[in-house]
Image (tube, rainbow, N blue to C red):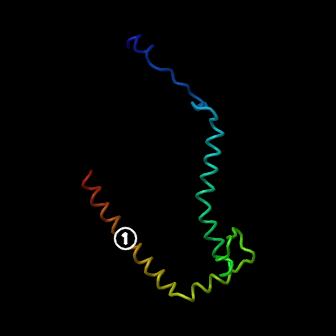
Amino acid sequence: MNTEAVAARPKTIRGNTRYRLAYPGGELSIQVTLLILAVVFTLPFWWMLSSSLKSDAEIFQIPPTLVPHTLQFSNYPESVTTINFFGYLLNTLRYTVFATIGAVLSNLVISYGFS
């Protein structure tokens, strides 16, 4: 092996190293950005859960509240009995099972063609 080729290779650092970011603020700005994004993506789920536990009057209240004043767990059995919930659930399960089987079979044929 040529000694010039060995000298031209970049040196690699092994072990537990931390890479520094090239802009000011570095790791703190990344952590703050990730925290803000976590709150933004979690807020709709929190709103959905809190709205499901509110009374009808509290849902349409202006200004809206993030936390219900009284938790109404009776909304869940009422929603199941008011509509044909289990019929809709069966329809969804039937659709997803057949769609998954179709995707697996078609991907199997396609992957055989790629190999």
Residue extending furthest top? 3
Q: Dot 1: within a 10 Å radius of its alpha carbon, few (fewer than 14), some, or many (20 or more) residues?
A: few
Figure quadrant of residue 69? bottom right
* Vertical placement of residue 52 versus 11, above or below: below
The residue depicted at 63 percent of the width and 76 percent of the height is 52
* Vertical placement of residue 63 versus 2, above or below: below
The residue depicted at 62 percent of the width and 35 percent of the height is 26
- 107 left or right of 42? left
- 11 left or right of 28? left
Figure quadrant of residue 4? top left
Where in the figure is residue 85, as x and y percent of width and height?
A: 52, 84
Where in the figure is residue 62, as x and y percent of width and height?
A: 67, 73
* Vertical placement of residue 88 versus 105, above or below: below
| Residue closer to the observer: 11 or 112 | 11
**Kind of residue at badge 1:** Ala
Figure quadrant of residue 102? bottom left
Where in the figure is residue 59, as x and y percent of width and height?
A: 65, 76
* Vertical placement of residue 110 versus 7, above or below: below
| Residue closer to the observer: 112 or 56 | 56
Residue extending furthest front? 62
Where in the figure is residue 111, as x and y percent of width and height?
A: 29, 55
The residue depicted at 61 percent of the width and 46 percent of the height is 33
| Residue closer to the observer: 111 or 84 | 84
In the picture of the structure, the residue carrying the numbered disc 1 is 99
- 9 left or right of 65? left
The residue depicted at 45 percent of the width and 13 percent of the height is 7
Q: Secondary structure at mark 1?
A: helix
